[in-house]
Amino acid sequence: GQQVMQIPQYQHVQEGEDFTTYCNSSTTLSNIQWYKQRPGGHPVFLIQLVKSGEVKKQKRLTFQFGEAKKNSSLHITATQTTDVGTYFCAGSSYGKLTFGQGTILTVHP
Amino acid sequence: DTGVSQNPRHKITKRGQNVTFRCDPISEHNRLYWYRQTLGQGPEFLTYFQNEAQLEKSRLLSDRFSAERPKGSFSTLEIQRTEQGDSAMYLCASSLTSGGPTDTQYFGPGTRLTVL
């Protein structure tokens, strides 16, 4: 079945540093979705990428979808303490989502 | 609040007991999904409905698990003869899709199950 791998598993940064998490799928995806989950919370939808090579920005967050639609990345510029949480990518193949393991981001003030 | 709601938020039960969770999706969303999340892992797909039809079930969903969406609105997930390994957060998500490549799923707050 489809597998989605995400690295790194943990990332500790100082406030103001940049952060990147990478996502790779074993199969071609119809789209990829990114979620953020705060400790004790539930996944909150951030963005969806559909087109090959697509790049989308949300303020300090930049999302990319690979040309082959098998990989993706999330980059946060100048992290803030409010960015802490676990960031998940989830691959979609016309239905269910297959989540990566997530990257736990810690931001030290 | 017009988001996905789940009840109860927490459930503690003894091994061997049956439990039932409820999910109310965002109104007019035609798809409803159930996922299970354990500590340190991403959510794992269990099953999903389009309207009242159950379209796919994961191999994770043993015969002790059953889900329904009788009128295409709310859904229930029942676990019979619970085991300690069933302890997890059970998440429900809903989406509005026409079958194309986009299917943004919105998650509820989850039901945390603890089996003693």
Image (cartoon, rainbow, N blue to C red):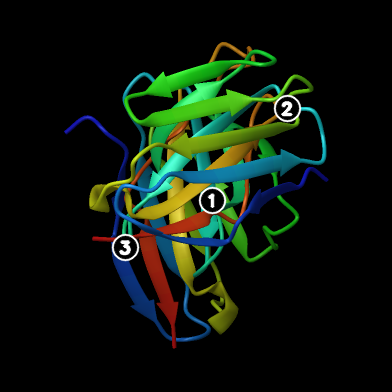
Position in image of residue B15 (x %, y %): 50, 86
Q: Secondary structure at mark 2?
A: loop
* Residue drawn 31% across the image and 24% down it: B27
Q: Nearer the viewer, residue B73 or A104?
A: A104
Residue B22 is tagged as none
Residue B35 is tagged as 1
Position in image of residue B50 (x %, y %): 56, 26
Q: Secondary structure at mark 1?
A: strand
Tag 2 residue: A29
Q: Is residue B18 left or right of residue A95?
A: left
Question: Mark 3 and mark 2 in contact (Cβ < 8 Å)?
Answer: no
Tag 3 residue: A40
What's the CA distance linking mark 1 and mark 2?
A: 19 Å
What's the CA distance linking mark 2 and mark 3?
A: 29 Å
Q: Nearer the viewer, residue A21 or A99?
A: A21
Q: Which quadrant does the C terminus of chain B fall into?
A: bottom left
Question: Mark 3 and mark 1 in contact (Cβ < 8 Å)?
Answer: no
Position in image of residue A35 (x %, y %): 45, 40
Please name the amino acid that badge 2 sits on.
Leu
Q: Which quadrant does the N terminus of chain B fall into?
A: top left
